Image (tube, grey):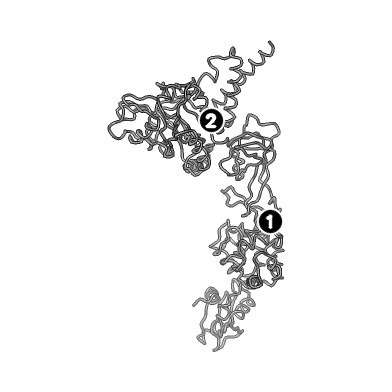
Amino acid sequence: MKDLKKIKEKIEKLRELIRYHDWRYYVLADPEISDKEYDDLLKELKKLEEKYPQFITSDSPTQRVSGAVLEGFPTVKHRIKMLSLDNTYSIEELKEWEEKIKRMLKRDVKLEYTAELKIDGVSCALLYRDGLLVQGATRGDGERGEDITPNIRTISTIPLRLMGKDFPSRIEVRGEIYMEKEDFKKLNEERKKKGESPFANPRNAASGSLKLLDPRLVKERNLKCFIHSFGWVEGVEFDTHYQFLSKVREWGLRVNPATRCCKDLEEVIQYCKEWQERKDSLEYEVDGVVVKVNSFSLQKELGATLKSPRWAVAYKFPAHQATTTVEDIIFSVGRTGMVTPVAMLKPVECGGVVISRATLHNFDEIERLDVRVKDTVLIERAGEVIPKIVKVIISKRKKGAKKVKVPQACPVCGGKIMKEKEEEVYWFCINPNCPARLKQSLLHFASRAALDIEGLGESVVNELVERKMVKSLVDIYKLTKEDFLRLPLFAEKKADNLYHAIGESKKRSLARFLYGLGIRYVGEKIAQVLAKKFRDIDKFFELKEPDLERIPEIGPMVASSVVKFFSQPQVKEMIEEFKRLGFNLKEEEKIKKNILKGKVFVFTGELEDFTRTQAQKVVEELGGKWSSSVSKNTNYVVVGKNPGSKFEKAKKLGVRMIREEEFKKLLKGEKV
Ligand SMILES: [Zn+2]
C-alpha cells in the first residue's frame, strides 16, 4: 500500500519534470536536456503507467502531443492533428519497429518505404486554397497551432501560388522550416555585436524568428522550408507517399532532394548509415531520418496512436548531446600560440564516444555561457568535431561554483599572453620558443621572406622538434651536419646543403630577422620600417609605445605588440645568443654607404637633431668629409640656429648653404 503511494508520487514527479522540459523546449525554445534524455523520461513514465494504469490521467504527457500554444498570434485548430513521430535510436530498434507493424498487418506483405532526412527545424502546416497560400501555422501542441501566415509568406522557398493546373482545390501540406548553418552563424555574430544573446542552435533560431511580430525582420532571417507530408487534401488521391512528394514538387513546393524510395528496410538502413556519415556536408542540420510506409492504403490500415502514426518512425542519428559536470577548466595552447580554454568533464557517453573534455573556444564564450567549475552542462558533439558546451544548467548550479579568469601567463611556457585585438576574444602566447608553438615559429623563421633557409620545411622541423634536437629558434644554428644525418631521408648532400643554408641565413638583414621572429602584427612591411628606423636590435629593448607610435606606419596595436615582445626576458637572452652565434642584427645600408663621397661639409650654429660631433660622424660614415672652416673646397655649409662667422664667409665665397632639413635629406641619399 505504502509502495503504491510512492509510485504515484514518482509518476507525478516525472510528469512535472516532463512538463517543465516541454515548456523550456516549446515556449522558451531553450531546452535544458537532450532529446534522448527527454525521450528516456517519457519512456520511464510510459512504463510506469502501463504497469499501474490506475494512475493514468487525461492530462498526463503520455496522453497528448507535447507542446504549448504560444501567445501573441491567433490560434488555429488543425483539422487533422499534427502528430509527432516515435523515435528509434538504433538499427535494431528500427527492425523491431518493422516487425511490430508486420505483426499488426497480420499478413506477410512486402513493405516499401520512403526515407527522408529529418530536418532539425520547426514544423508548419500550410493551407492552399485553389492554389493560393491562405494560411500558415505552427504545430503548437499538435491540435492547435499559431497562425503565423504573415511570417510564413516571407519565406521565399514557400510558393504563394502553386504551379500547374492539376493541384487540388484544397490541400494542407506540412513541412519543416529551418535556418541554414551559414545564416545561423551570421545571425549569431550580428547578435553578439549588438550585445544580444546568441541562439543555441539553428532550430532555436528558426523558431525564434518565426515568433517575431514584424514580418520584415523574419524575411531578413532567410528561413527555408521543405515539404514532407500533408494533413488533408480534397479532390486528389495518391497511392503512395513517394508519389505525393513527386506531385507536390511539380506544383512548386520544395521537397528535400535526398528523399529516397526504398524497396525494403534493408535499403532504408543503408540510407540511414549513408546520411549518418554525410550529414555534416549539408547546409542545414539534420538529426535523423524519417521512415514512412510508402503505401497510403497500408498507412490507413496501420493508423495512429494518440501521439504518433504507426506507419512512420524517426531514426535518430546517435545522440550527440549529453549532460555532465565540469570538473575543471584548463587552458591549452595551440600551434599558433592561441590560448584556448578547455572544460575538463566528468566522462560521459555521447554518441557512442566517451567525452571527457569540451572546447570553450575563447574567453568570451566562457562569459557568454557563464560556465564555472562544478557546473552541470549540456554538451554536444557534431561529427568528429571536438564537443562543445551548449549551455549551463543554471538550476543545477552548486554553491561555490567558481568563475574562471583569463590566465596571467601562458600555461605552457609561463610567458606573456596577449589579446589579438582589444575588441577580439583570442589570446596568444607571444614567446616564439614556447613549446606549444615552436614548430610554427621555426617554419616562419625559416620562410622565404624571413631568414630564407632552404630545406628547413615542415617535415624537417617536425623531426627536429619531436626529437628534441631543437628547443628554440637559436638551436638550429647549433646543429651539425652529423645531426642532420641522423634524420630520416638525409644523405650526405642534403645534410650538407641544409647545414650551409642555415649558416648563410646569419647574413640576412635586420628587417628579415625581425619579421622572422613572428612578432604579432609585424609583417614584412612593418619589419622593414622598424629596421630602417632603429637599425640595431638592441634599440628595441629600450622602446616604449610612444617611440613607435610616432612612426606614421605604426599604430598602437603594433607598438604595444613590439614593446611586449621585447620586454620578455627570454627574448633578450635569445637575441644575445643569436649575436654570439655570429648574427650582426644591425641594419647596414650598404647602398648608401658612399652617398656623400667626395663632399665636404662645414657646420655652423646649433642643429636640432644632432650635436656637432654626431653630425660630423654621420658625414664620415657616409663617405663624406667635414671641415671646421669654410673654403673654396667646401661643398655645403650646414646652417643651424645662431650661426657664426662661417655663415658670412660662405656667403662671400658663394658656397652652397643648406638648412638642417636639407642636410637630413642628403643623408638619406635624396637630392636637395
Ligand atoms: Zn607559451
Side of 371 relative to 107 (left or right): right
Side of 622 relative to 571 (left or right): left
For this rendering, which residue is in front, 479 or 612?
479
Q: Amino acid at mark 1?
A: Pro
Residue 499 vertical position relative to residue 379 in the rendered view, above or below: below
SS for callout 2: helix
Residue 534, by quadrant, is bottom right
Q: Which mark is residue 95?
A: 2
SS for callout 1: loop
**From the viewer's perspective, is the residue at label 1 or at label 2 nearer?**
2
Residue pictured at 58% horizontal, 32% vertical: 34
Quadrant of the picture in which ligand 1 is shown:
bottom right
Residue 549 vertical position relative to residue 659 in the rendered view, above or below: above
Density class for disc 2 (Cα within 10 Å; few <14, some 14-19, many ≥20) is: some
For this rendering, which residue is in front, 31 or 650?
31
Q: Position of residue 427 (x, y in %)?
A: 62, 50
Q: Could you tell me if the residues under marks 1 and 2 are in contact, i.e. CB atoms within 8 Å?
A: no
Residue 96 vertical position relative to residue 6 in the rendered view, above or below: below
Mark 1 residue CB less than 8 A from any atom of ligand 1: yes
For this rendering, which residue is in front, 640 or 547?
547
Side of 89 relative to 496 (left or right): left
Residue pictured at 63% horizontal, 29% vertical: 395
Q: Earlier in the sequence, mark 1 or mark 2?
A: 2
Q: Residue furthest bottom?
A: 632
Q: Which mark is residue 214?
A: none
**Disc 1/disc 2 C-alpha distance (Å):** 52 Å
Q: Residue furthest front?
A: 108
Residue 53, by quadrant, is top right
Residue at image mark 1: 435
The answer, for residue 234, to whether it is visible in the render is yes
Density class for disc 1 (Cα within 10 Å; few <14, some 14-19, many ≥20) is: some
The answer, for residue 70, to whether it is visible in the render is no
